[in-house]
Image: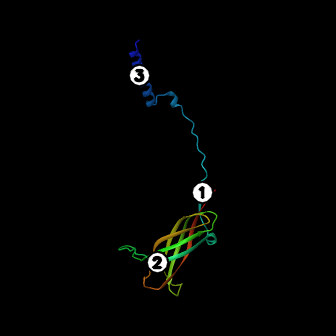
Amino acid sequence: MNSRTLLTKGAVGLALLGATLVCGCNKASSVPQPVVEKSQAPLPTVRKLPENEIRECVHGAFITLAPSSTFRTSGDLRPFWTVSGAIHNECDFDLKSVTIRVIAYRKGNSDDTLDTADLTVDDVPFHSVKAYRREIQLMNNRTQKFGFTYEFTAATGEFEP
């Protein structure tokens, strides 16, 4: 056998071996491999906080309620207002969301509610303060004298298992 024949047979052998591996005909690769599941750390659980827990550890400070330049030409035509404030999370866990209700009332009579609007602030880390700025819609005449207050109506916390 000459070197040319040997080279040709070697090339053909390599080509067949490559085709066998590509086609999945290799016996060694058809042996099922055991599936090893990775152990996962337990996921944090999220739960709704009861009212007493919200009162104890979620506190806030409004900075402003100011007229916004945003307006609509159809649908809900109530005026937009910009609300800016901060949430103090004094809990020992992260807050996933906090819902704040803004209540507008007739100036001098807090029992005469003009309108309410809810806004949500997400992801407030434990023992920290998070500022927010949101637009809400309140039905009151911008020239009308009114007061406002707020309350925390709902919150969810994220707990490590």
Which of the two labelled residues, at mark 1 and mark 3, occupies the earlier sequence position?
3
Of tags 2 and 1, which is closer to the observer? 2
Image quarter (top left, top right, bottom left or bottom right) of the N terminus: top left
Label 3 sits on a secondary structure element that is helix
Amino acid bearing label 2: Ala
Q: How far is the residue under mark 3 from the one under mark 2?
A: 81 Å
Which of the two labelled residues, at mark 2 and mark 1, occupies the earlier sequence position?
1
- Residue topped by disc 3: 11
Which of the two labelled residues, at mark 3 and mark 2, occupies the earlier sequence position?
3
Of tags 1 and 3, which is closer to the observer? 3
Left or right: residue 69 compared with residue 27: left
Instruction: Name, please, the residue furthest toward the top.
Output: 1
Q: How far is the residue under mark 1 from the one under mark 3?
A: 58 Å
Q: How far is the residue under mark 2 from the one under mark 1?
A: 38 Å
Label 2 sits on a secondary structure element that is strand
Q: Residue 114's spot in the image, x, y percent?
A: 48, 82
Q: Residue 67's spot in the image, x, y percent?
A: 44, 78
Q: Quadrant of residue 55?
A: bottom right
Residue 44 — which label?
1
Instruction: Name, please, the residue furthest toward the front.
Output: 3
Amino acid bearing label 1: Pro
Q: Residue 9's spot in the image, x, y percent?
A: 41, 18
Amino acid bearing label 3: Ala
Q: Quadrant of residue 123?
A: bottom right
Location of residue 72 with respect to 13 vertically, above or below: below
Residue 66 — which label?
2
| Residue at 46% from the left image edge and 78% from the top image edge | 66
| Residue at 46% from the left image edge and 74% from the top image edge | 82
Q: Residue 72's spot in the image, x, y percent?
A: 37, 73
